[in-house]
Amino acid sequence: MTMETRADAERQALEYPFDSVPETGEVLEVATGVYWLRMPLPLSLDHINLWAVDDGAGWALFDTGIHSEATLAAWRRLLGPGGALGGRPVTRVFVTHMHPDHVGLAGWLTREHGCELWMTFGEYMNCRVLAADSGREAPAEAIRFYTRAGWDAQAISQYRARFGGFGRHIAPLPQSFRRLEHGQRLRIGEHEWRVVVGAGHSPEHASFHCPALRLLISGDQVLPRISPNVSVFPTEPMADPMRHWLDSLAGLRREVPDDVLVLPSHNEPFRALHARLERLDEGHRRALERLLVALAEGPKRVVDLFGVLFRRPIDGELLPLATGECLANLNHLLHQGRVLVSEDEQGVAWYRAG
């Protein structure tokens, strides 16, 4: 889930240079040798943007789409004889982060084209671990985690039934990969790209900056119309991903100039990066303040605070994401000493202003 930001003034400030988007199986050139692709997603957010960069002998691909028949068919059409990418091979597959819409077909593409997968260590290893959960029963730690957040018996039952679904959307990953690191410089075709690593939305998210072309492939780290989900998960219940997220926004502003064309994973390419980074930072800080106001009224569970953060009803598949994002905000305030928490006899956590 993504937390919507109603920033009409900011949307007017952002510049969207393209009047159309590429249809599935087609491409649109956004800079010399850099092409925009779109793949379908079976979600309310119904698309992901992918990027193909001329790498001399073939195409360097950035992200892959989810493992589905629709995405497989689109890739076969794009890369096959007469396809929009000219039937040239894939030279490398770069993945920004481990979520299935980004890494889903990385294994298939690297096997089909005999090329390497490039990811950060944290993203590759976390993806391998989560994919290995496929078919397992939900662990007791996860049940305690969501019970602590205030989930009722029906929600816990639905979680048990859905658990282990991560790997179903990912083709088997290759057993080896090339590591991406912050500050690393990569020669792709005619130009040099620099890796910019951030965190919060995922453990070690890679974005890619090309100074010569004035481009930033931002993945999910910066999106123009929605705010990426920043969540706490049962594997690390006291984590503070909000601190990492806010630090990463500041890092992008320091390291990437404002004049880039941002190529995001969702919505459309845009300019005015620094204005967007500032708005994202402000939005999350306002959310923290709204939580403090709500908690000053009296103790509340995680599930009692959804209305403070989100402008839509929270149920079904949105419940784990909303819970994770709410906890990311609460944990951040806990680490700052601005919020206190205690558990009742049923193991449910109650938060109050410190």
Image (spheres, rainbow, N blue to C red):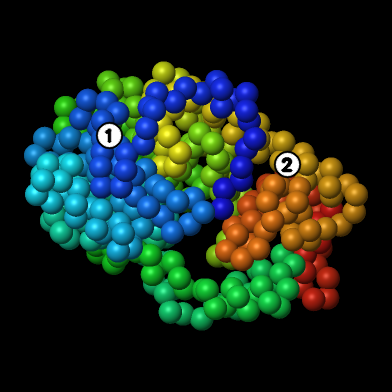
Left or right of residue 305, residue 173 in this image: left
Label 1 element class: strand
Q: Residues within 10 Å of mark 1 (few under 14, many from 20)?
A: some
Q: Residues within 10 Å of mark 2 (few under 14, many from 20)?
A: some
For the residues bearing labels 1 and 2, Cβ distance under 8 angstroms: no
Task: Please name which of the two marks, 1 or 2, marks the residue nearer to the observer.
Answer: 1
The image position of residue 349, as x and y in percent, is 77, 64
Q: In front: 148, or 49?
A: 49
Residue 189: quadrant of the picture:
top left
**Chain-order first, disc 1 or disc 2:** 1
| Residue 197 image position (x, y, % from top left) | 41, 40
Q: Residue at x 57, y 78 (%)?
A: 160
Amino acid residing under circle 2: Leu
Q: Residue at x 38, y 69 (%)?
A: 168
Q: Which mark is residue 288?
A: 2
Left or right position of 92 against 246: left
Please report the residue visible at 36 percent of the width from the left and 36 percent of the height from the top.
21
Q: Nearer the viewer, residue 76 or 238?
A: 76
Q: Residue 315: x and y, percent?
A: 65, 63
Residue at the spot of label 1: 28
Is residue 171 placed above or below 94 in the rendered structure?
below
169 sits left or right of 77 in the view: right
Q: Quadrant of residue 319?
A: bottom right
Task: State the separation of the CA atoms marked 1 and 2.
Answer: 39 Å
Q: Left or right of 2: which side holds 309?
A: right
Looking at the picture, how far across and down is residue 92, in whole percent?
A: 20, 46
Can residue 239 be seen here? The reply is no
